[in-house]
Image: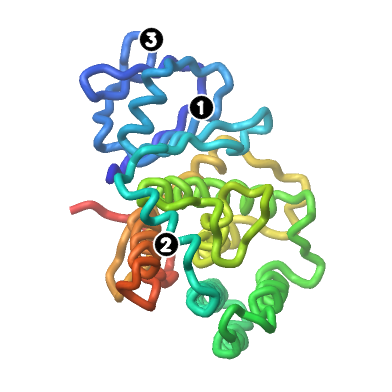
Amino acid sequence: MGYRNIKIETSQQLNIKNSQLLIGSSGEVQIPLEDINSILIESQSVTLSSYFLQKMAEMGIAVYVCDEKHLPNAVLLPMVRHSRHFKLLKCQMNLGKPKQKRLWQQIVIRKIENQSACLRFLNLEGAEELLKMSKQVQSGDKTNVEAKAAAFYFRKLYGLGFSRGDDHIINAALNYGYAIVRGMIARSIICYGLEPSLGLFHSSELNSYNLADDFIEVFRPVVDLHVSGRFDISEVDRALTPEIKRELYGIVNYDMLVRGEKHILSNCIDKVVASYSSALQGNREELELPVLMELQVHRYE
């Protein structure tokens, strides 16, 4: 798994030569493909070849493209990264309802626990109440504690007047960060041979990434913690700048805790997906879900 996340903001040519990414018409910048985790192409005047896309898919590198508002709106994903896709597809389709509900329960509990930690790290009230709510989550979350916790959580983060539907810098930043993480999760799901449209809780026939929208729930508080520490609800006229978007893209470099050990976000995502694959095959009952920690960029030894 690569570790470098590259953002292309200006008109550039992207080429591949000798397993190196060449950036610029003369290849001024050269980066080994094996070092690359993801590429975000923000500029609409970047030129690249089908061979470039082929190599990105072959290496399992997530390639994001942005719309005219410079927001991520698509991600290139590999299609043949796993030799046992059909076996895992059958496992997904045959997953029993009781186990499906128990796995979703685990995700909701960890999401609320991470939301509680987010409030605690920001020195805001409500962390203890969220922990109490996490203990009320039943199999399949049939009493919808997740939605109640989310409403409570965002009121504590931004006040009673805040709505996730508002046209505000906070929501723009949250959506940008969520889109980056969602793309990472979708990439990992494909690489592990799973069908991303078959979710545990999310089940829209119009959504090709229901499973990614299940797994992202435990990672949302990482984005929330980053955004809440940088923007105020009073900043109604502020817009996403290139610098802000660079910082948001950098969220993928933060650490989370898995079994008490620090792992970079992309590795945490892989651990969640790998544990789900193992659970599908009857080898485990618990998902390996990460725990939010105070924001810290991963350091490579």
Residue under label 1: 9
Residue under label 2: 91
Position of residue 32 in the picture relative to residue 81 (left or right): left
Q: Rounded to the nearest whole Å, what is the CA distance between mark 2 and mark 1?
A: 41 Å
For image coordinates 31% across by 24% down, the residue present is 21
For image coordinates 54% across by 56% down, the residue present is 198
Specify the amino acid type for callout 3.
Ser
Q: Nearer the viewer, residue 76 or 25?
A: 76
Q: Are marks 2 and 3 in contact (CB under 8 Å)?
A: no
- Measuring from the top left, give residue 121's x and y in whole percent: 50, 73
Q: Nearer the viewer, residue 169 or 283?
A: 283
Q: Secondary structure at mark 1?
A: loop
For image coordinates 70% across by 67% down, the residue present is 158
Q: Rounded to the nearest whole Å, what is the CA distance between mark 2 and mark 3?
A: 47 Å
Q: Is residue 112 above or below residue 254?
A: below
Q: Quadrant of residue 159?
A: bottom right
- Measuring from the top left, give residue 79's x and y in whole percent: 41, 38
Q: Secondary structure at mark 2?
A: helix
Specify the amino acid type for callout 2.
Cys
Residue at the right extreme of this rendering: 161
Specify the amino acid type for callout 1.
Glu
Q: Quadrant of residue 293?
A: bottom left
Q: Rounded to the nearest whole Å, what is the CA distance between mark 3 and mark 1?
A: 15 Å
Q: Label 3: how many residues lie within 10 Å, few (<14), some (14-19) or many (20+)?
A: few
Position of residue 169 in the picture relative to residue 184 (left or right): right
Residue under label 3: 25
Q: Secondary structure at mark 3?
A: loop
Q: Which tag is nearer the camera, tag 2 or tag 3?
A: 2
Q: Is residue 271 above or below residue 259?
A: above
Position of residue 83 in the picture relative to residue 71 (left or right): left
Camera sees residue 229: no
